[in-house]
Image: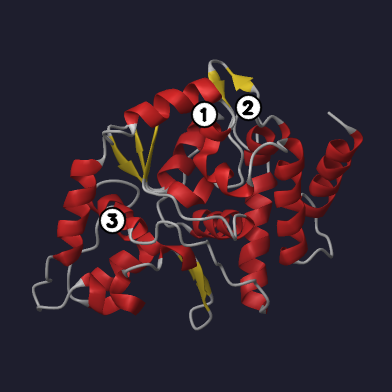
Amino acid sequence: MNLLSKALITLLLISLTSVSYATPEQDKETFQSFYTERFPDISKAEFGDGVYALDQDARDQWEAMNDFPPYEDDLEEGETLFNTPFTNGKSYASCFENDGENIRQHYPKFDSKRNMVVTLELAINECRTNNDEEPLPYKKGDIAKISAYMASTSEGSEINIATPTSKGELAAYEAGKQYFYSKRGQLNFSCANCHIQNVGRKARSETLSPALGHPTHFPVYRMKWESFGTLQRRFDSCNKQVRAEPLPGQSEAYRNLEYFMTYMSNGLPVNGPASRK
């Protein structure tokens, strides 16, 4: 590792693991610069391909598999669910700007009236309850299929999370950042330990993916799951791997973490839904 990479890591850890005077915009620039310096032959947009941007053999297998995506049936079902009217005759389209199409890149967003982060999946369920429908279980199942369909209509649009500036926005952002860098579980690991400090290295037989671009391709169809799962379902998997207790879907900590991670990937194109091992 050259001196610039070491300097970037040092700067990253100083600016993001402790209370600092860095703005979210400065954090993002440092975060993204680390990866583009660490992997100079990979374009910023390619980080949305996760581990397949780093491992050519894995990428070749992944691209061959995507000739016939394993999620096509679930994606079609998500479109059907999205377009099926509620009992009152309204639909999901009535709850969202632009009828719910090409909006994935703006989520999560901060609701200043309620002083909280709203993810796309939370907005989907609030749409249901506002129309006298029962909420769907979070993390997988129908809500992931609907979210995947909505994400597919944003393919190619760049993630564009508004820069946190208000007191509430900054508090949520800082909480998400803190969770990302905090160690937990019996293994005493943080998100950053795997996806920054050891990015590109092997953990058993798997290559550790870059955190930059993680939110771009969710919901993801994982071969292990044989179904779509949301980003928060993946948070659960990571917590289990470090032997930490997973959190409830749409808990404040998970929503803030998703807010922070997605803001770190601002400017990358939406390329989901996607398939992963």
**Quick one: label 1 or label 3, which is nearer the N terminus?**
3
**Quick one: label 2 or label 1, which is nearer the N terminus?**
2
The image quarter containing residue 209 is top right
User: Quick check: can you spot residue 129?
Assistant: no
Q: Where is residue 201 drawn, in percent x and y?
A: 65, 23
Q: Which residue is mark 1?
A: 241
User: Quick check: can you spot residue 193?
Assistant: yes
Image height check: is 200 above or below 247?
Answer: above
Instruction: Name the residue furthest right.
Output: 3
Image height check: is 102 above or below 240?
Answer: below
| Whole-number angstrom distance, CA of label 2 to CA of label 3 | 36 Å
Q: Where is residue 196 drawn, in percent x and y?
A: 69, 38
Image height check: is 108 above or below 130?
Answer: above
The image quarter containing residue 98 is bottom left
**Residue at the spot x=36%, y=27% of the render?**
64
Q: Amino acid at mark 2?
A: Leu
Q: Secondary structure at mark 2?
A: loop
Looking at the rendered image, the quarter that the N terminus falls into is: top right
Q: Amino acid at mark 3?
A: Tyr
Q: Which residue is mark 3?
A: 149
**Residue at the spot x=87%, y=31% of the render?**
2
Q: Could you classify mark 1 by the number of other residues whose Cα lies within 10 Å: few (under 14), some (14-19), or many (20 or more)?
A: some
Q: Could you classify mark 3 by the number of other residues whose Cα lies within 10 Å: few (under 14), some (14-19), or many (20 or more)?
A: many
Q: Which mark is residue 23?
A: none
Q: Where is residue 25 drawn, in percent x and y?
A: 73, 65
Q: Nearer the viewer, residue 273 or 260?
A: 273
Q: Nearer the viewer, residue 107 or 87?
A: 107
Are discs 2 and 1 less than 8 Å apart at CB? yes
Q: Which residue is mark 2?
A: 187
Instruction: Name the residue furthest top.
Output: 204
